[in-house]
């Protein structure tokens, strides 16, 4: 009985099945938690979504591409690789299912006592994990309450810095941008959303290079996807990047939470 976190699948459904095979996945015994971005770029996005809907023991957080899909579903407009989903017969069911996915998951391993925080992009140093969990729930509730309004006003890179007094769409956008799009931030936790490479610039460093008190907890592990250029390299075993670029013809990776062992399949 094991729990695995799996990196960004991006419509690479065949590779995902091969990975499940490799870890000898049993739906009745094992748990899977995906880091989001189930869809887009790859060719089998619809198959991937359908598989997850049919296997409710598979959990996922929402990634920026999943949110983009939600937006396209909300305006009933297919685009690129997501056309197959927007035009699918069960598109209403997919929309409803996606709306119910969280932005943050917490998983405790009771044998080791380790706690894992799973988000698509990460948790900025200005927030403790419990604060991030609360804000994630706040944004999810707003999304469910008024999906159209939320999704329509979600786009944009501003504001760039968190401020407790932010309200309405600005606040939701900020929460979503930290949890699903963040890579580099500065000392004030200002986001640089333009740089998708692995190289720091000016005063911006990878979000996990700062020194939040929670980051020092020896039993806390931060699991994220999103940053394919990083290819899992954080130089800190408490920050585990699982997007290993499957859709860029690299690898799809699973992490077994019990012993932190990684399993990968090649594209
Ligand atoms: Mn992403």
Image (cartoon, rainbow, N blue to C red):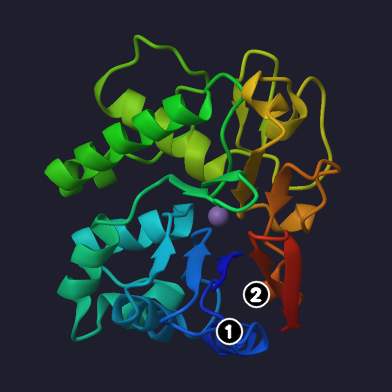
Tell me the residue at 39%/11% (across/down).
Answer: 164
Residue topped by disc 2: 247
**Disc sitting over residue 33 in the figure:** none
Spot occupied by residue 167 in the image (x, y as percentages of width and height): 28, 18
Please state, as top left, top right, bottom left or bottom right, where the N terminus lies in the image: bottom right
Mark 2 residue's CB less than 8 Å from ligand 1? no
Q: How much space separates mark 1 and mark 2, taking CA atoms?
A: 17 Å
Are discs 1 and 2 less than 8 Å apart at CB?
no
Q: Quadrant of ligand 1?
A: bottom right
Q: Seen in the image, is 127 located left or right of residue 166?
A: right
In-front residue for pair 130/168 = 130
Spot occupied by residue 24 in the image (x, y as percentages of width and height): 61, 87
Which mark's residue is nearer the viewer, 1 or 2?
1
Residue topped by disc 1: 20
Q: Seen in the image, is 192 located left or right of residue 171?
A: right
Q: Is residue 254 above or below residue 172?
A: below
Of label 1 and label 2, which has the lower sequence position?
Answer: 1
Q: How many C-alpha atoms fall within 10 Å of the one at disc 1: few (<14), some, or many (≥20)?
A: many
Spot occupied by residue 28 in the image (x, y as percentages of width and height): 41, 82
Tell me the residue at 25%/56% (across/down).
Answer: 100
Tell me the residue at 65%/65% (across/down).
Answer: 256
Question: What is the residue that sits farthest to the front in this orientation?
Answer: 111
């Amino acid at each position: 009985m094991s729990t695995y976190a799996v990196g960004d699948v991006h419509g690479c459904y065949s590779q995902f099945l091969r990975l499940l095979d490799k870890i000898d996945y049993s739906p009745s015994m094992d748990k899977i938690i995906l880091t989001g971005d189930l869809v887009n770029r790859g060719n089998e996005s619809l198959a991937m979504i359908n598989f997850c809907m049919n296997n409710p023991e598979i959990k996922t957080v929402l990634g920026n591409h999943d949110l983009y899909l939600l937006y396209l579903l909300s305006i009933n407009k297919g685009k690129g690789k997501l056309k197959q989903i927007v035009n699918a017969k069960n598109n209403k069911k997919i929309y409803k299912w996606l709306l119910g996915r969280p932005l943050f998951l917490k998983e405790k391993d009771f044998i080791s006592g380790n706690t894992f925080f799973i988000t698509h992009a990460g948790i900025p140093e200005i927030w403790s994990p419990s604060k991030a969990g609360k804000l994630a729930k706040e944004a999810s509730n707003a999304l469910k309450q008024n999906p159209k309004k939320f999704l329509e006003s979600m786009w944009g890179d501003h504001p760039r810095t968190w401020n407790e007094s932010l309200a309405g769409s600005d606040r939701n956008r900020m929460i979503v941008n930290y949890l699903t799009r963040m890579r580099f931030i500065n000392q004030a936790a200002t986001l640089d959303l333009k740089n998708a490479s692995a190289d720091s610039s000016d005063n911006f460093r990878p979000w996990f290079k700062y020194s939040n008190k929670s980051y020092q907890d020896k039993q806390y592990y931060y699991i994220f996807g999103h940053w394919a250029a990083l290819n899992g390299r954080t130089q800190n075993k408490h920050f585990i990047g699982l997007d290993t670029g499957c859709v860029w013809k690299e690898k799809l990776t699973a992490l077994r939470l019990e012993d932190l062992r990684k399993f990968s399949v090649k594209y």
